[in-house]
Structures are given as structure tokens and as C-alpha cells.
Amino acid sequence: MSPGFFTTMGIPILQGRDFDARDERIAPQGKAAFVPRVAIANRTFVERYLAGKPAIGMHVGFGRDPGTPAPIEIVGVAADAKYTSVRDEIQPQLYFPFLEGPHVGVATMYVRTTQ
């Protein structure tokens, strides 16, 4: 996600902040697995995985082991949104900044205009 994604899509940031220039980081050359530093969680993620605890500043990681490192800081909480179908159940989501990734294989662009 890039700065302004949530505004463009009409998804309110409920707590914390949107992504911005602070989140830009260049991936090391040749590094295949690149772990982002920050994320924005949706409300369902917070309710399901954080048991309603304050999310801002919480650290999370990927893995099943209780000792899994948790290097990703949640900097914002966004309202829930549906992506594939309005009939789908809301899924827990973590959004990562586009500016942190090493490269983009496929990208979808959204533009909001006044017309």
C-alpha cells in the first residue's frame, strides 16, 4: 500500500496513522525474504488476534512457534473492507507499505478524481 491508499479507497483509519515517507526503506540487494517494519491492521485482525488490546505499537510476526520474532510494528488500525465480494466474510488483514518492499511483481493502481 502506498501513502493515501486508505483515503483513496474510502477506508477510514480508526487509530494511529497512514503510511508515509517514514516507512520508505530500500531492501538489501539479493535479499529474497524481506520483512516489513510496519503494518496497518484492520479492525477484524485486532479483534481476532490481539483480543481487543491497544494495537498501536504492538509488534507482530509471521509463524506458528510462540518464539517467532515479532519485528513488525502496528502503526495504524483501518476500518474493515471487503475486496472480492460484498458477500464475503471480513478477513483479518495486515497492510504493508509499498515503499518497504524489495520489488513489485504485480501492482494494482487506484486513482480518485473529482469527476
Image (cartoon, helix red, strand yellow):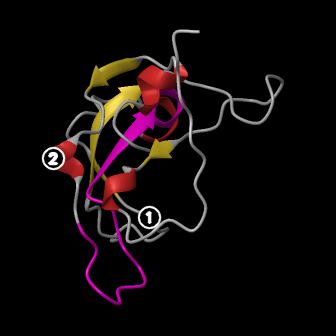
Which part of the image, by quadrant, shows the C terminus?
Answer: top right
Q: Residue at x 48, y 29 (%)?
A: 47
For the residue labelled by badge 2, is the local secondary structure a helix, a strand or a loop? helix
Residue 114 percent across, percent down from the top left: 52, 9
Q: Nearer the viewer, residue 85 or 111?
A: 111
66 vs 112, left or right, is: left
Is residue 72 placed above or below 89 in the rendered structure? Answer: below
For the residue marked with disc 2, what is the amino acid? Answer: Arg
Identify the residue under disc 1: 62
In reply to whether residue 76 is colored magenta, the answer given is no
Q: Which residues are magenta?
A: 26-46
Residue 93 percent across, percent down from the top left: 53, 41
For this orientation, the residue located farthest to the bottom is 30
Q: Residue at x 29, y 69 (%)?
A: 69
Is residue 32 placed above or below 8 in the rendered structure? Answer: below
Residue 46 visible in image: no
Identify the residue under disc 2: 22
Q: Residue 56 lies in what quarter of the image?
A: top left
Residue 110 percent across, percent down from the top left: 56, 34
- Which of pointers 2 and 1 lies earlier in the amino acid sequence? 2
91 vs 56, left or right, is: right
State how far apart marks 2 and 1 are (Cα).
23 Å
Q: Residue 106 lies in what quarter of the image?
A: bottom right
